[in-house]
Amino acid sequence: MGKYQDFYRKSIDQPDEFWAEQAKLIDWHRPFDQVLDYSRPPFTRWFVGGLTNLCHNAVDRHLKDRPEQNALVYISTETGQQQSYTYRELHAETSRFAAVLRAQGVEKGDRVIIYMPMIPEAVFAMLACARLGAIHSVVFGGFASASLATRIDDAQPRLLITADAGMRGGKIIPYKHLVDEALRLSSHPPQKVLIVNRGLDKEMAITTERDLDYASLREQHRDDRVDPVWLESSEPSYILYTSGTTGKPKGVQRDTGGHAVSLAASMRHIYAGQPGETMFTTSDIGWVVGHSYIVYGPLINGMTTILYEGLPIRPDPAIWWKIVEENKVSVMFSSPTAIRVLKKQPPEFLHKHDVSSLRNLYLAGEPLDEPTARWIADALKVNIIDNYWQTETGWPILSSVPGIEDTPRKFGSPSFQVYGFNLKLLHESTGQEVGVNEKGVLVAVPPLPPGCLSTVWGDDTRFVNTYFSTFETEMVYSTFDWATRDEDGYYFILGRTDDVINVAGHRLGTREIEEAIQAHPNIAEVAVVGIHDELKGQAVMAFAVAKDASRTSTPESAAQMEKEVMATVDKELGAIARPAKVHFVSALPKTRSGKLLRRSMQALAEGREPGDLTTLDDPASLELVRNVIAQWRKE
Ligand code: AMP
């Protein structure tokens, strides 16, 4: 048996010994009494009785061995700023931030929403919450006010932290303005809003009594000492909202001890990063990749992490490689879409810089197609490692594990099941395991390993019903992805089993987008599907029925309505969810029981046949869809 096989088997056959060993990678204020309490399946309590703190593990712990090493390097090609923070400085800034929060009454268990651009204060804010035992919920800055308001109402935060503005492609994006609007829409607005004023939005409005200026409070609390609050391992560290099949996003809740151990272990084994080295993850703190591999993972592992505010092609498409060269990056993490964007640029940009420090480039979030993987592997001469995981798991489910054994990789496959995950592929209707190279639903046999979601915030029933109730035959965690496994044990992901769309690695729910479109007063009904897109993996396409059909009867009026629908989505959800195309039809294809036939619409939009139509109620409705697609293709 190979080295990785041994390692994997131990994680499944002797999980207590295995995870007790991994738990040594972090500091415990008090040791745990029990590795796993699984007395209430499918709920897990990892490292029961252990006391620890994430901020201590990410920051304070390194003051002994590496106080003068850079912990955080902030690079903004939007504002031209560059600033490094050593572990000592990161400790000071995080303590100040924690002191400011504490002075506002933030305590253990309180929720704090962070709605911020990619600036160092966003990282200080996350770590400061962790220091106090407060539960942060970072909301991606691309989400609109209404989405932010939904998350505020669910998390009911004591405080919201924001900035005056962000910048994207040289354009100022007002954040505080969106926060004001979200607070107006919300039924549980926080009492206070803490603002990091970057001086970008000169017109920012201030609400006295409610709005607080971070810079002045930071001065007041410059030298305050805030000790980490020790949490029992299972106490929550954060909530991160993600989309599913309903319109209401789910708050993925992560614990503290299991989370820290899973990240520390993944940094060693999967990302193979050494303390003192540099990691560059090109995601955003608003996504799970940002939480795990911009902030917590690299810092827990004593590495230098790069926080990059900007686009991959500005000021030119060599910017990432320049960052790699100047910072001697050895581990890099990005997404297939970003690489496809770079692939469209003139090839010389890839060779302008010395990237020999780079060992491995990890790509995750969406399927990695073979041409893209080959292109970047040849160009950079580094290992390309496809990682498959989800917001729910917090770290990879499928990957090669080069820190243990550098197994050969196959293009198109994220390799093997990662240690701790006991995976199966089940037939969608019988629930039986499928054979080699046969398509099944990818599931994990519980207990889930440390670091995975402990529940859905405030809704244990939703946690069990959503994730563990797909099959009657067996209680298993469903990933909602189709997959196959070949004769060598390599997995291949084939796409979602539910109505989730993946645009540029970002998860969007069809119901959420449909609800946003319905906010337009002239929309009677709408169906949203994800269709194949060369660059972004999938693009959003909508089929809508107008209440007043005369407003869509000419190409000009339909184009005007389409614009209005797109603007509605921008306002309700954010531009990331904006449909690439809105088709207007007089009826939508449904089953006799009234369910939308999204899959048939998707097939037609992708130029395939619509599949099984035995339940279709009105055949004419499908022909309408066929016709608008044919017309659209001609255009
Ligand atoms: P998110 O929670 O937003 O990260 O989305 C997770 C989903 O993205 C998974 O359920 C998959 O559908 C998809 N996904 C993530 N990583 C990969 C990958 N390496 N290959 C294929 N699909 C992926």
Image (cartoon, grey):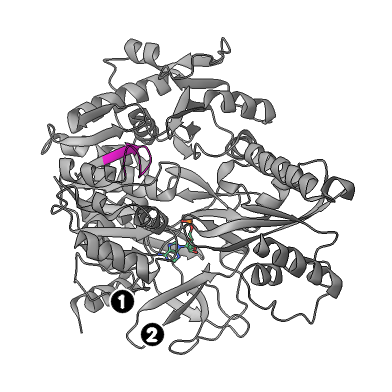
Q: Is residue 327 magenta?
A: no
Magenta span: 306-316
> Which mark, residue 410?
1
Pick the front one: 432 or 529: 529
Residue for point 81% across, 59% down: 585
Magenta span main SS: loop
- Amino acid type of the residue that numbered disc 1 sits on in the rendered structure: Lys
Tell me if residue 547 can be seen. Answer: yes
Mark nearest the camera among 2 and 1 is 1
Tell me if residue 477 can be seen. Answer: no
Q: Position of residue 19 (x, y in %)?
A: 28, 63
* Residue designated by label 2: 486
Q: Quadrant of residue 224?
A: top left
The answer to whether residue 518 is left or right of residue 100 is: right
Q: Earlier in the sequence, mark 2 or mark 1?
A: 1
The answer to whether residue 565 is left or right of residue 195 is: right
Under circle 2, the secondary element is loop
Quadrant of the image containing the C terminus = bottom right
> Which mark, residue 591?
none
Q: Are marks 2 and 1 in contact (CB under 8 Å)?
A: yes
When the figure is inspected, residue 230 is found, relative to residue 477, above or below; the finding is: above
Q: Position of residue 142 (x, y in %)?
A: 52, 39
When the figure is inspected, residue 309 is found, relative to residue 469, above or below; the finding is: above
The answer to whether residue 56 is left or right of residue 193 is: left
- Amino acid type of the residue that numbered disc 2 sits on in the rendered structure: Asp
Residue for point 80% across, 71% down: 623
Q: Position of residue 620 (x, y in %)?
A: 86, 72
Pick the front one: 597 or 55: 597
Q: Quadrant of residue 572?
A: top right
